[in-house]
């Protein structure tokens, strides 16, 4: 019997292990363990005040802080019945897209790319692939600057508050951002070409792909829950369809959709919404004869690269006709109520739900992050993928497994509520 | 955060040799370090063992960020009741985290880089000091000093908002208060902080005991200064 054990899977956000026991070329046992410290965010948000929830929720993760911040803010506003202005929505959408760009670029250039180029890290690539690394850094800086200019800081934004913004950006800063975004298009196209050029294992496993969907636009900011297998339900009914399960070996919960594993993230979004992509992003798909819906987890990297194009051009469009007006945050009264919000964020759909009492204290909080929704699907992919590569050398098997897991771009600090790989040959 | 200083990153990577950085590196060595940046709070015995090992192998140890310094936001749970784990995870799971503490509770720390998130300039300056095998001096001015220098309207005195700027370590260039958000105290209390006076001001604003407690139990509730006042409140 042989054991494959990936202890502390690297180049993902957070800490996780994969344990696999193999007997007679068959996988006997497989566990994906998230081992990051349990964090009880939903527990200690109870008793906190409505106006600090987004600050606290932002700290669930450094990589996708904006996702949790914006989703918390939206859920609290829904609980209080606050309707924000169109300008506020537009600026928040820009922060959301800036944060997806930030995260995708970090994942593509610094976590995934070294695997494809055969390096242990992006640091090791700086001499031989200097231009590529510099391109990644330049694009990432721009994505950070979108968040800094509009949200006041690249991580844990400051200015978004209930009802609007504590401080608005200047029109001049936004104009400059628009210019830089336009200039960045060529680099984005190069990035997409690069990731499409990489050869991936031919592995695919049929599973449902779930994301938000909207008639109006490529759903990120709003929409209903949709899947390629035909699920179509309002986001506010998420709890009826998503089941959270605690497992003994992990501090992350596993989530099922109507009791099945499913995948969220860039692949799922494009699979459900490809007709709503910008023309430039659709062109990339057509020219390269890519097919969506797509059952290959490895295609998540390509899907993220296509989204870079979509997001860049959507940010350009949002900024082009934005004439900033001075406005104060919307006034509101504190009252009891429940608010739910769902957003598409770098790794998939995130849900926040808060129940407030009459003085605005949280009495119940529920947060479902994207990675928890993907964990079961990752486990099942590994189970099916592994037998197809068992004849390979152990080090090669481990690298392929890591590649598969990394393609999901799992963010374990978000879901822990942690990755290492253990292969056990009996 | 280190990866967010894009412009200086090339320079940093050429000056320093990163040997252990699992977020971005596949091959990570646990041997000897000149500088060890520890990020995140300590929540279980294995982590205590790991940081003690890292301390032995390192010349300088830096607590990187407020979680490593005080336990950070997740330390809020230390002030909650025991039922929290069961509420979040159900009764099935054994409790993985015991307490949430900064690394200074277990090992000797050479430099605390505070903040949630840390400040890029401070990170770059710290690396410059390290290059000369020196530890940067402690900066002990409150956020208030930087805020006034910028000519901001006082959110505490004028707007009667529960700002923590006067008792909190500066060095952040008053980033929040300059954008209309009262200081949340993410860099923790200064040794000279008059916490009792702050409580009195907050009481005068009509804040309830619970409101005031929430102000202190946030980023640095585990600090000595705040632990004392929280016992009294």
Image (cartoon, coloured by chain):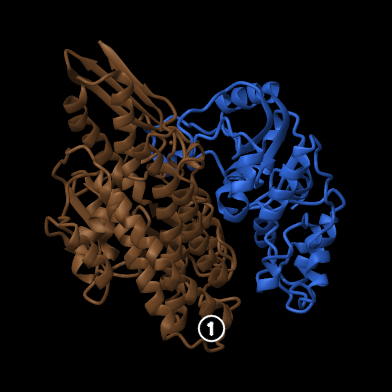
Chain colours: A brown, B blue
Name the residue rendered at 35%, 69% in the picture.
Answer: A221
* Residue A216 coordinates in the image, percent (x, y): 25, 77
Task: Choose between B50 and B126: the one closer to the eye.
Answer: B126
Q: Is residue A78 left or right of residue B46?
A: left
The residue lying at 48 percent from left, 35 percent from top is: B25
Residue A359 in sight in this render: no
- Vertical side of A254 occupied by B59: above or below: above
Q: Is residue A245 above or below residue B50?
A: below
| Depth check, front residue: B41 or A191 | A191
Residue B86 in view (yes/no): yes
Quadrant including the C terminus of chain A: top left
Q: Secondary structure at mark 1?
A: loop
Horizontal arrangement in the rendering, residue A356 relative to residue B214 (left or right): left
Q: Chain of mark 1?
A: A
- Residue B87: give x, y in percent of width and height: 43, 43
A385, above or below B123, in the image? above
Residue B184, quarter of picture: bottom right
């Amino acid at each position: 019997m042989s054991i494959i054990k990936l202890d502390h899977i690297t180049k993902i956000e957070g800490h996780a292990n994969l344990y696999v026991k193999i007997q007679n070329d068959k996988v006997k046992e497989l566990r994906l363990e998230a081992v990051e410290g349990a964090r009880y965010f939903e527990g200690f948000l109870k008793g906190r005040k409505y106006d600090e929830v987004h600050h606290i929720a932002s700290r669930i993760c450094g990589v996708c802080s904006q996702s949790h911040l914006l989703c918390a803010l939206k859920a609290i506003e829904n609980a209080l019945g606050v309707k924000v202005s169109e300008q506020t929505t537009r600026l928040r959408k820009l922060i959301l897209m800036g944060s997806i760009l930030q995260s995708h670029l970090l994942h593509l250039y610094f976590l995934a790319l070294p695997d494809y180029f055969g390096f242990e890290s992006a640091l090791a690539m700086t001499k031989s692939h200097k231009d590529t690394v510099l391109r990644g850094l330049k694009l990432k800086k721009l994505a950070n600057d979108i968040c800094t200019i509009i949200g006041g800081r690249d991580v844990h934004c400051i200015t978004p508050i209930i009802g609007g913004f504590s401080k608005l950006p200047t029109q001049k800063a936004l104009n400059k951002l628009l210019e830089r975004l336009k200039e960045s298009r060529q680099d984005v196209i190069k990035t997409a070409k690069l990731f499409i050029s990489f050869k991936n294992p031919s592995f695919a496993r049929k599973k449902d792909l779930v994301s938000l969907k909207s008639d109006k636009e490529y759903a990120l900011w709003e929409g209903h829950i949709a899947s390629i297998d035909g699920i179509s339900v309002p986001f506010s009914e998420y709890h009826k369809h998503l089941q959270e399960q605690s497992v003994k070996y992990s501090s992350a919960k596993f989530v099922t959709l109507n009791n099945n594993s499913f995948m969220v993230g860039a692949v799922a979004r494009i699979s459900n919404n490809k007709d709503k992509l910008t023309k430039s992003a659709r062109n990339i798909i057509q020219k390269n004869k890519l097919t969506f819906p797509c059952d290959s987890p490895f295609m998540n990297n390509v899907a993220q690269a296509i989204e870079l194009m979509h997001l860049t051009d959507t940010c350009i469009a949002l900024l082009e006709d934005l004439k900033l007006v001075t406005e104060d945050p919307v006034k509101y009264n504190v009252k009891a109520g429940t608010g739910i919000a769902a957003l598409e964020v770098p790794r998939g759909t995130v849900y926040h739900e808060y129940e407030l009492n009459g003085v605005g204290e949280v009495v119940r909080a529920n947060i479902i992050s994207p990675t928890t929704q993907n964990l079961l699907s990752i486990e099942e992919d590994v189970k099916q993928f592994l037998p197809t590569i068992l004849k390979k050398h152990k080090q090669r098997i481990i690298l392929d497994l890591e590649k598969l897991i990394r393609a999901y771009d799992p963010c374990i600090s978000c879901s822990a509520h942690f990755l290492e790989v253990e292969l056990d040959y009996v | 955060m280190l990866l967010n200083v894009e412009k200086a990153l090339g320079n940093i990577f050429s000056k320093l040799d990163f040997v252990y950085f699992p977020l971005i590196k596949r091959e990570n060595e646990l041997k000897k370090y000149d500088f060890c940046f520890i990020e995140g709070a300590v929540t279980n015995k294995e982590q205590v063992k790991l940081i003690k090992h890292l301390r032995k192998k390192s010349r300088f140890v830096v607590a990187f960020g407020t979680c490593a310094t005080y336990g950070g936001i997740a330390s809020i749970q230390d002030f909650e009741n025991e039922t929290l784990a069961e509420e979040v995870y159900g009764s099935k799971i054994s409790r993985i985290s015991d307490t949430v503490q900064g690394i200074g509770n277990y090992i000797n720390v050479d430099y605390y880089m505070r903040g949630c998130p840390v400040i890029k300039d401070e990170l770059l300056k710290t690396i410059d000091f390290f290059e000369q095998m020196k530890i940067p001096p402690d900066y002990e001015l409150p956020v208030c000093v930087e805020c006034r220098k910028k000519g901001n309207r006082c959110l505490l005195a004028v707007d009667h908002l529960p700002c923590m700027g006067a008792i909190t370590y500066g060095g952040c260039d008053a980033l929040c208060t300059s954008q209309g958000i009262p200081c949340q105290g993410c860099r923790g209390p200064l040794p000279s902080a008059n916490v009792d006076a702050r409580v009195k001001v907050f009481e005068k604003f009509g804040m309830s005991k619970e409101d005031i407690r929430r102000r202190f139990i946030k980023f640095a509730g585990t600090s000595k200064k705040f632990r004392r006042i929280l016992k009294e409140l």
